[in-house]
Image (cartoon, grey):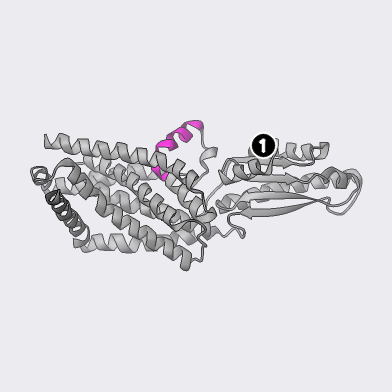
Amino acid sequence: MQSRIIRIKALIKKEFLAIFKDPKNRALIIFPPIIQLFIFAHAITLEVRNIDVSVLDYSNTQYSRELISRFSNSKWFRKVQYRRTLKEFKDDIDLKNSQLGIIIQNDFAKKINEKSPTKVLIITDGRQTNSASIVSGYASQIIGNYSSELEKKFNIKKTQINVITRNWFNPNIEYKWFLTVSMIVMLSLVLSLLLSALSIARERELGTFEQLMVSPLNNDEILIAKTIPPLIVAFISGIIITLIIAFVFKVPFSGSISLYLISSLISLLSIIGVGLFISSLAYTQQQAILGVFAFQMPAVLLSGFVSPIEDMPIFFQYLSAINPLRYFMLITKGIYFKNMDALTVFKNLIPLIIIAIITLSIARWSFRKKAE
């Protein structure tokens, strides 16, 4: 057992030396993630497409139903779902089943009949800042148009319905909140995937892979040694980026630090598993880099970063279920912004653990096959 630990430690040391020996590698690890963080935080803009709505209608009258029908018939909104309790309503926003919530008070119809101003509460998901702003604008426009119809109907000049907007998880709709926290996932993906994907391909290109296969190290030891260095480097990089976001960009961290660190390690392990799988198929570093690009772009698009997963076609929603970045993004934002509970985190970690087991097992099988 002691000799096995010594062999693994020696190979881990070799992997760290291979990563940091080349000045270009050191620059790649240290500077681009920090530079990209600042560039993306100020330069990227996003779009919103379909919108799902949850409605809590305490009034349940002709006027409230007429108002909600405007959302059902709008080209901007896809699905309107009524909720009976505030908990169901909150869960829809919390779990991203809806991007917009509407609460209508029980005196809504009474005040309209009395020709008195009334209010409608609009709830948006502030975790998607760009979507929240656009969705809020759409809702305000629809409610404003309905208010104008009532003003003409009752022949009054004052505003009949006032819109009150609340942005959950990001009250002031700070766009940098959403983007910078998303960059934790994006930059961790780039770093962990690239380092792991180049690992075995580099050995083959340099002609040292065969030497590794005939060394006293077995397949499990090689797999462990190839996994730990990129995991540690990407994990530390993620911590540094998180600290920059919290203390430089002043984005408040709301969740459990220990839960955040554990989930980050498991998420990175699943991505490294994909990287080692790519590396096991590649014979040169160029092929490995192409494999990284082939996986990286679809993974980003299917993660919910660009467009909410619920708004994608059904096929792509199913396809995103095998994307580790989807769960990594959901967990990171959930813990960072709203203190996601341990049970919900664990439910989203299960697919990541399965992905890690499958990809690492395939990589190990590839080692054995090459050795034979």
Q: On the image, numbered disc 1 is attached to which residue?
A: 80
Instruction: Say whether residue 302 is visible.
Output: no
Magenta part, dominant SS: helix
Q: Which residue is located at x 42 percent, y 64 percent?
A: 243
Q: Nearer the viewer, residue 263 or 134?
A: 263
Q: Residue 54, relative to residue 11: is it above or below? A: above
Q: Nearer the viewer, residue 275 or 235?
A: 235
**Horizontally, is 221 left or right of 289 in the view?**
left
Instruction: Say whether residue 170 is visible.
Output: yes
* Residue 75 location, quadrant: top right
Instruction: Look at the image and say whether residue 250 sits in the magenta stretch.
Output: no
Going by the numbered disc 1, the residue's amino acid type is Val
Q: Position of residue 271 (x, y in %)?
A: 34, 46
Q: Position of residue 93 (x, y in %)?
A: 60, 45
Q: Which residue is located at x 11 percent, y 34 percent?
A: 372
Residue furthest to the front: 1
